[in-house]
Image (cartoon, helix red, strand yellow):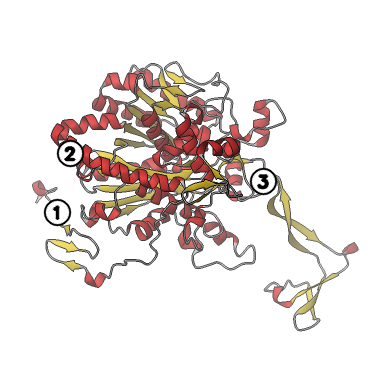
Amino acid sequence: MSRLPVIVGFGGYNAAGRSSFHHGFRRTVIESLPSAERQETLAGLAVMMKLVQVENDQYVDAEGQVLNPADIESRFGPQILDGTLVRRIEKRYLDVDAAHWQKNLTITGEAGKPFSFITLAKQLPEPLPTDWVIENLNDTEVMVTVYDGCDIKVDSYRSLPVKSAGQLPSGFEPGEQYASRFHPRGLQMTIVAATDALRSTGIAWETIVNCVQPDEIAVFASSAMSQLDENSFGGLMQSRLKGNRVSAKQLALGLNSMPADFINAYILGSVGTTGAISGACASFLYNLQKATEMITSGRARVVLVGNGEAPITQECIEGYGAMGALATEEGLRSIEGRDAVDFRRASRPFSQNCGFTLAESSQFFMLMDDELALQLGADIHGAVPDVFVNADGFKKSISAPGPGNYLTMSKSIHSAMQIVGEAAVKQRSFIHAHGSSTPANRTTESELLDRVADAFGIHELPLTAVKAFVGHSLASASADQLASALGSFKYQIVPGIKTIDAVAEDVFQQNLRINIHDVDRADNPLEVCFINSKGFGGNNASAVVLAPNVVERMLRKRYGEAAFADYLTRREQTRSAAQAYDQRALKGQLDIIYNFGQNMIDDKHIEITRDHIRVPGFNKPLVFRKDDRFGDMI
């Protein structure tokens, strides 16, 4: 009997805002929400974006006038909407109209004659060029005479072809939420996102830790692009070229394992299994697969899994742009047939498009085995019974799509049918497509999904793509998809791809249903979602996600009605605590967890016996398990 990995908490931040309690999902379907929920989410965004403040538990504007959620929507609604989702890149990242670079300049004297200039002695290059003659002018300055000319680099500025990205809500800076000294932006986002996921469970972390052995906790998190800003690899690579010094932190903090390392060291204090698995744009599902395998096998009972990615840097934009992978201003102008470009519609899955849109995001999910979830009264948002990963085989182009995704999606649908039955999959499932918004993706992914659906007798399979709203966050992309899928289960809405006017003619959709408006599924509730992801290099992954109502049916059958009724009683307290956090977070009290140098374990106090290890700070010992795996061979 396998343990079922259930989702008991989730959170994070992307271009739609805070993910916990479905606020990010609400932003993507804002037009389809009842007024109370719409205004609550807009009010939370207004606080996050510093448009309003909270004083004495009330919303107030810059003049101190008290506002209610309806007032906030009326006054700031358009500004909130404009400052979220995919949009023109803001200058807090870089000036896309005047991006800094350097030009090489060759200088010679008039008619080949020598020329001179004055500079500081400490700025002279080492060693001196052979045709330079130096004359000391004073204690600090020298006169340099150059005989054969020289090459210099001068500052220059140019407009970038790519001008759009999925950015965190305007005004929200994760580094302002805690003591983030010299932390790269991706790690800042990891701290606030992992905190959000942990708080969303409604269960104190100490309570969870006291119920499991130290090695029954695991963390899997990574960043596909590592950390690339000036506080990490970006600064490491640029420092000497800019005449600066390399810091002691830039290399270490740049590693793609740092999201997991930061969570273990500064949030959870975990001594359990840890890992940082990268699979290009499928990285989250690679980590999720490891998490589910650890739980189903019984090797872990609690796993925090996610990613942090902050790729909105000039180098990253130019790198993907050089590949022709990103939507450019000129490309969008050509598609729209007008001079004015709507950057909010830059990401256009399954329609006329010209490339994907980079985005930043950090998303985390708390998974438990079903028994522990019932014991603790955890609120269950869904379950992930299977994640499948397959490569493409021999390739000519490392970035081109391949056959591996046919395997992952086929196995996912077959798995779901075995769990919930054919009828449920055929009538009550939907796909969160990779939907990267490239011309190649719209044909290749739609063809494979259409063919796989046909093979299993599925017709009019609903398809959506969250990248239309939040862009492509690389390692975190499928985490954005999963967060959105949980929102669909909660509100029974399949988000329409609202950045497009029509599906492209070359998209395969004989067995798919692609809508440009939100679809209400209250009359036929969704039970299964397939998360699909395709990454450069042949990194394909697909996951099966079960809705909460399906998980509850499964738990009732496994544990019986009496045990399940007891669980429901405990769950009420959990939900109450979780909602209390949500209300604080909506008013800007994010309660960030950052335990720097606190509660460190003195390894001298670790107790080791032949049967177990007792680690200070953990209620239960790590008990050695009997190993009979190779009994037939010994």
Q: Tell me the residue that label 1 is attached to.
A: 625
The three-letter code of the residue at mark 3 reads: Val
Q: Tell me the residue that label 2 is attached to.
A: 566
Count neighbours of disc 3 (C-alpha within 10 A) and say few if under 14, some if 14 to 19, many if 20 or more: many
Q: Please identify the residue farthest to the right as the structure is shown.
A: 111
Residue 62 in the image: state x and y as whole percent.
60, 49
Residue 169 in the image: state x and y as whole percent.
54, 44
- SS at mark 3? loop
Frontmost of labels 1 and 2 is: 2
Give the mark nearest the N terminus, 1 or 3.
3
Q: Tell me the residue that label 3 is attached to.
A: 96
Is 97 situated left or right of 619 in this image? right
Q: Are marks 1 and 3 in contact (CB under 8 Å)?
A: no
Dividing the picture into quadrants, the one containing residue 368 is top left
Is 132 situated left or right of 67 in this image? right
Cα gap from disc 1 to disc 2, whole angstroms: 31 Å
Q: Residue at coordinates 13% horizontally, 34% vertically from top-left? A: 562
The three-letter code of the residue at mark 2 reads: Asp
